[in-house]
Amino acid sequence: MQAGTRRLSGAETAIAVVAAVLVLVFAVMVAMRVSGPGGQAPAAASGSQETTATSTAPEEPATAGEDLSGVSFDFAAPSGNIACSIDAERALCGIADFSYADSIPSAVVAACEGSVGHFLQVSAEGAELVCDTSGQQLQIDTSGLPTLGYGQERTAQGFTCTSSETGMSCAHDDAGYSFAVRRAAYDLS
């Protein structure tokens, strides 16, 4: 036989086939990991800035709703557009003016017998938009309400809310669920 024309033995062929299959499986797994859920590249990997509502957690339609007209806020963002409260069950923020209404999933809007978009909450079960059945336009009265300055955070009852120049974010410290909200967008994770 001439050099380079030797045939592979059965064992060598089997090893080559197994190696090729493993390389193919690895390539598919890497492609799935890079593309993220739903086949879309994660914002961080693509380098794009978030400009509309996004969610990294499955977004369920808002619950039947609750009357939030009597909500008592604990602190507000310096802008006065966002105010939040923290209790043993949840961190809840209200936003008076926002421009992301068209980005709220239609299933969430349809499931709400009130208005959705002005309130977000995080609990041990997850983060979500809250359906407000009060029928009232949210007005945030910041008089006498402590301001959570940009770069500051408030931690209470297992929740942490952080104020920044781009909005407010709140997280359940143990479960890791969170939301972020600003005039142009919201994010649930």
Image: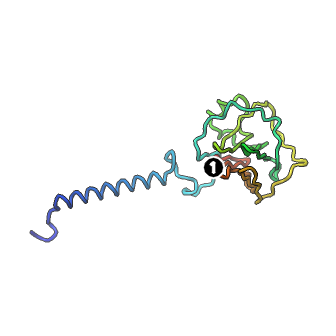
Q: Nearer the viewer, residue 97 or 10?
A: 10
Residue found at the far right of this picture: 144
Q: Name the spot of residue 147 as percent of width and height, x first.
A: 84, 53
Q: Residue at x 61, y 45 (%)?
A: 55
Q: Amino acid at mark 1?
A: Ala
Side (left or right) of 59 relative to 116: left
Q: Is residue 22 above or below residue 188?
A: below
Q: Name the spot of residue 126 as percent of width and height, x first.
A: 64, 43
Residue found at the far top of this picture: 113
Q: Secondary structure at mark 1?
A: loop
Mark 1, Cα crowd under 10 Å, few <14 / some 14-19 / many 20+, is some
Side (left or right) of 143 relative to 50: right
Q: Nearer the viewer, residue 102 or 105?
A: 105
Q: Residue at x 74, y 40 (%)?
A: 118
Tag count: 1
Residue found at the far left of this picture: 1
Q: Name the spot of residue 105 as percent of width and height, x first.
A: 62, 37
The N terminus sits in image quarter: bottom left
Residue found at the far bottom of this picture: 3
Q: Residue at x 61, y 33 (%)?
A: 107
Q: Residue at x 77, y 32 (%)?
A: 67
Q: Nearer the viewer, residue 133 or 11?
A: 11
Q: Name the spot of residue 46 as percent of width and height, x first.
A: 55, 56
Q: How is the image coloured?
A: rainbow
Answer with the quarter of the image where residue 73 lies. top right
Q: Which residue is mark 1?
A: 175
